Amino acid sequence: MIALSVAAVLAVFLLYTSIAGGGTPALKPSQLAGHTGRVSLAGLVVGPVTGDAHGAGLHFRLRDIGSKPGSLLVPVVYTGDLSDQFKVGRHIVVDGTLKNGTFVGVPGSLLTKCPSKYTASSSTKQ
């Protein structure tokens, strides 16, 4: 009897989460136009990087990963902690909203992808 009740509660939860979502949409810079509300933006950091992440904000631009130089750039302003790995040319993901053409990052949401975790090591190369 208890197992049946637990199963029913789990079924309702799964149905609710599948309908309501509950996740933040993940977009690349070329998909950002026209989106409102909070999204996760993933892209390649393009310089120059100016400002202060713990002051008025760090300013940089993002473009789609794998796109050519000269492609669509989205200006970003971010305040909060940064990884030591953050720099021009790194792939990042940051949550935020688009306001007046600039993506405003949520403090503490910026993640830098470490390239060494996504490339083959010398021992696996042949």
Image (spheres, grey):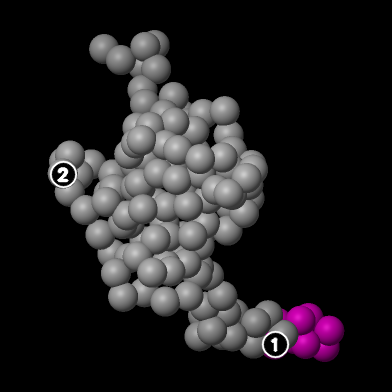
Position of 75 compared to 126: left or right? right
Q: Name the residue: 77% across, 87% down.
A: 5
Looking at the figure, which quarter contains the C terminus?
top left
The residue beneath circle 1 is: 8
Q: Name the residue: 37% across, 11% down.
A: 122
Residues at discs 2 and 1 in contact (Cβ within 8 Å): no
Amino acid type, label 1: Ala
Name above or below for residue 3 compared with residue 30: below
| Residue 48 visible within the image | yes
Residue 1: % across, % down: 82, 88
Decide which of tag 2 and tag 1 comes sooner along the chain: 1
> Quick one: label 1, few (<14), some, or many (20+) residues within 10 Å?
few
The region drawn magenta spans: 1-8
3 magenta-colored: yes
Q: Name the residue: 44% across, 24% down.
A: 116
Q: Could you tell me what secondary structure mostly forms the magenta stretch?
A: helix
Q: In which quarter of the image is residue 31?
A: bottom left
Amino acid type, label 2: Gly
Name above or below for residue 52 compared with residue 14: above
The residue beneath circle 2 is: 70
39 magenta-colored: no
> Quick one: label 2, few (<14), some, or many (20+) residues within 10 Å?
few
SS of the residue under disc 1: helix
SS of the residue under disc 2: loop
Residue 99: % across, % down: 43, 69
Q: Quadrant of residue 120?
A: top left
Q: Name the residue: 57% across, 79% down.
A: 17
